[in-house]
Image (tube, grey):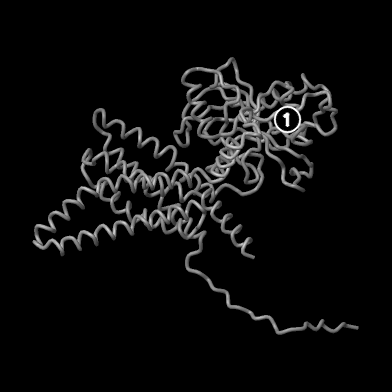
Amino acid sequence: MSSSPPVRDGPAPVLRPVQRRLLTSHSLDLVFFGIALVCVTLLALALARQGWRLAPQLIYLVGFWLLTSYLALPRVHRILTAIYVPDYFIGRARTTDGMLGDPINLAARGSENDVHRVMQAASWTRADPLRLDTSVRIVHAALARRSYPAAPVSTLMLFGRPQAFTYEQQVAGNPSRRHHIRFWPVPDGWLLPGGTPVDWLAAGTYDRAVGLSLFTGQVTHKVAADTDVERDHVLSTVRRTVPAVGVTTLKRFSTGYHSRNGGGDAITTDGSLPILELEETDLDDLPASVGPSADAGAPAPDDDLVVATTKAAQRAAARPIGLVGGLLAIAVGIALDTVSYLPHISRLAALTSTELNDLHAAGRLDGVIWGVLTAVYLVLAALIALTFRGIGQSRFTLMGAVCLQVMGQLWQWIALPPGSLSFPALLTTSMYVLGLYGLSSLAVAQWCQERGKDRRRRRT
C-alpha cells in the first residue's frame, strides 16, 4: 500500500533560470595566465636581441635566462602537465609546476609530534621554511661554502599540498650536499593502494651538488640517482637511535623503475615502501620536539610592539608572493612611466601656450591634461589597493590595463634592430610584465577566490 506524498505548506518554490556568463572568473584567470606567458616570452626575446653584442649588453642575456628559466618555462610546464599528468596518487610527489618529482619511499604511523621527536633524536635538523630571507641565506652559504644546517628545501606537492615539514642532515658542513626528507600528512580516511592505512608519507633524497635543472635551467640541487640508498639511510639513523621503532615494509609497493625527477635528475627505486611504526613505540624517554630554527628568535609575549609587528608580518605573509611582488612591480612601472612622461607634458603645455597665444585657454587645457592624469593615477591606485585586499574584479581590471600597456609595445620591439631599445623603456615594460605575471599566477587566483568566499560567508 503506497503512502501519499507529503504536503508542503507555503508557496511553490520559484525556479530561477540559470544564467551563464560568457567568461567566468576561472576562464579569465586562464586567459590572463596565457597572456602573461606570451608577454614574458616576448620580453625575453627582446632582451636576447639586445644582448647579441659585447658587454655591457651581455647583461640582457642574463635577463633572458632569468625570464625563461624562472618565469616562462615553469608556466609552460604548468600548462602541459595539467593536460598529461594524471591527477591521482601514483607514488610520486610533484613540483609546483606540476611535473613528477621525487618518489615516495617512506611512510609512518603516528602523530606529528612522534615524527618530530624521533627525527630530532636521530640527529636530523628541521629545515627552515622557504622564504625570501632564507633563500638569500642559502645562496650566500653555497657561494661562500659556509654551513647552513637548517637550509630550506624546494617545495614539492602531494595531495595538492606542499610538504608539512622537512628534515635534513648537512654533509661535512657543505650546503651543496645534504640528506633530506619531506613529510606530508595523509588525508583523513585515505588508504595506500591495497588498503594499508598510514598517517604520513615521505620522500627522502640526497643532494649531491648544485647545478642547473634540465627542464628549466634554474639553479637547483642535483639529486643522487639511487633514492633507495637515502631511504635506507633514514631508516638506519632512526633505528640506531631508537631501536624500539618498528618497521613494516611493503614489498613491491610500486614497480621498480628508473626515471627523472622535476629537476631532470635520474632517479631509481626498487618500489618498496618501509613504514615506521611510531604509534606503537614508547617515546617517553625521548626529548620533546622543538620547532624549526626560524622560530628561535620569536619575540617575547610581553613585548607589545614586537608582537604587533610580527602579527602584521604574518598577515602580509598570508598573501601570495605573486600578489605582493606583482603589485609592487606595477607600482614601480607606473612611477617610472610618470617620471618619463612629466617632461613631455611640460613641453606640451609650453607649446600649447605659444600656439594659442591665449593664457586663459592654455591654462584651461593644461588643467585638463593634469586633471585627466590625476584621475588615471587615482583609479590605478584604487585598483592596486582593492587587488591587495583580494577583490577579483579589480585584479582583472588591473591586469587588463597592464595588457593594453605592454602587448603592442612588445610586438613592436621584436621588429626593431638589435640594440635600439633604451634601458629605461626596457625597465619600465619589464616591471609591467613581471606585475602581470605575478597577478596571473594560480596561487593568487586561488587566494582571491578564497577571500571572495570569506566575504560572502560574512555577509550571510
Please state if 229 lies on the left or on the right of 363 as rendered: right
Question: Residue 58: percent from the left, percent from the top?
Answer: 29, 30
Q: Is residue 25 left or right of residue 185?
A: left
As rendered, which of 93 and 371 lies closer to the eye? 371
Q: Position of residue 302 (x, y in %)?
A: 65, 34
Which residue is disc 1 drawn over? 116
Q: Residues within 10 Å of mark 1 (few under 14, many from 20)?
A: many
Between 274 and 159, which is closer to the camera in this rendering?
159
Q: Give me the residue at 80% from left, 29% from top.
A: 247
Q: Amino acid at mark 1?
A: His
Quadrant containing the N terminus in the rendered view: bottom right
As drawn, the residue found furthest toward the right would be 1
Residue 431 visible: yes
* x and y, in percent, of residue 41 in the image: 37, 45
What residue do we see at 72% from left, 26% from top?
Answer: 119
Instruction: List the single residue furthest toward the top.
Output: 172
x and y, in percent, of residue 237 in the image: 73, 21
- Using the image as rendered, state which of residue 166 and residue 232 is in the foreground: 166
* Residue visible at 50% across and 46% down in the picture: 78
Identify the element where label 1 is drawn.
helix
Does residue 353 appear to the left or right of 400 in the view shown? left
